[in-house]
Amino acid sequence: MALGSITLRLYVYTGTEGSYSDIDLKYTLNKNKIQGQNNIVLEVAELVRDFLDINFDGSYTSHTKWVSAVVNYFDDEGEEYTYSNPQTFNFLAFDGYGYFEDEINPELSRNVLISSNNIYLPEGTAGKLPIFAEGVGKLTIDSIDTEITDDGNSNQKIQYITIPADSSTIQVYDTDDTTLLKTIKVNNICEPKFTPYKVVFQNKLGTLQDLWFFKKTTESFSVTDETFKRNIINTGSVTYNLNETQNQRYNVNGKSKLKLNTGFIKEDMNQTIEELFLTENAWIDYEGKILPIIPTTKSMTFKTSLNDRLTDYTIDFEFGFDKINNIR
């Protein structure tokens, strides 16, 4: 008999690979084979994504989860189809994305989890470098080695390595500790005039990335409201009070916005700026608080050293909340 249908049980959980239990069962999917086809295709990425909560409160933590897909196969008569029934497939889930030209189901970076080869930090300020622990053996930061260990737990699959203040070069090695995978230049910026602001955003590789804005910052404010026309006549005296408004304002609220400038950066950072534009989650360290923001600039012209000589970007952001607290 030919393959007729499958049942898939989808488990999403934290911990180590395969350590799921019944409480981790999120979906049970059944699908019949389409006539004329030889296989059965299920898309589970969007289902899993519902359970990947990306947040940032100042602490850099791994947001990966294990996914186990347990598949039972049945023939046209509803009987078990294969001797290896069920089959279990284990995956590690990141909330990243591929571009169209990356083709279907691309595997993203297995070592350094940023796209550029440059990091910009204010002088005297430490930074964070996200890596995938499975694919990195060690980092060498200015000749000082940091060994990377992987115990298999989902909470340390993404590790944020501290970049000491005023470092200059980071070398990332494969698990054999000898194969150089990537060299990252740390650019330490002295900014005597403006206050630098750190934006943290979820990048293409599904991790948190810092991006500092060093130059002019402009804060603005906009208000929304509605009005209705009141009847202010005192029917007893058939008069009205000049101190009462006829046009009453209500549903008043506001939005604060920021315009930030990167300062001059290398062309290599264009990919990072693009990922910032495409992010769904971003925060800013602003006046001592970590606050959610939304990039509101919707278009960008890439700058290059050939066309523009110097590269910098001005980007508009909106705080991700109303000015007047209306959370009930």
Image: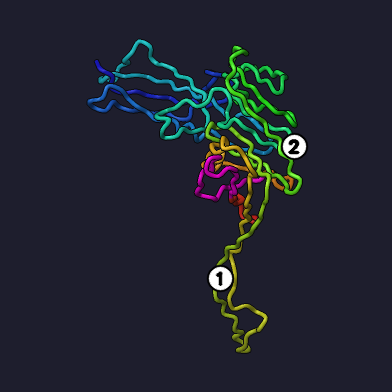
Residue pictured at 50% horizontal, 27% vertical: 108
**Res 328 seen here:** no
The vertical placement of 217 against 118, above or below, is below
Residue 60 lies in the magenta stretch: no
Residue pictured at 52% horizontal, 43% vertical: 307
Please tell me which of labels 2 and 1 falls first in the chain.
2
Task: Give the x, y percent position of residue 10.
Answer: 45, 26
**Res 173 seen here:** yes
Task: Give the x, y percent position of residue 12.
Answer: 51, 27
Specify the amino acid type for callout 2: Glu
Residue pictured at 60% horizontal, 45% vertical: 312
Label 2 and label 1: CA atoms lie apart by 51 Å
Q: Secondary structure at mark 1?
A: strand
Residue at numbered disc 1 = 227
Residue pictured at 59% horizontal, 18% vertical: 180
Residue at numbered disc 2 = 123
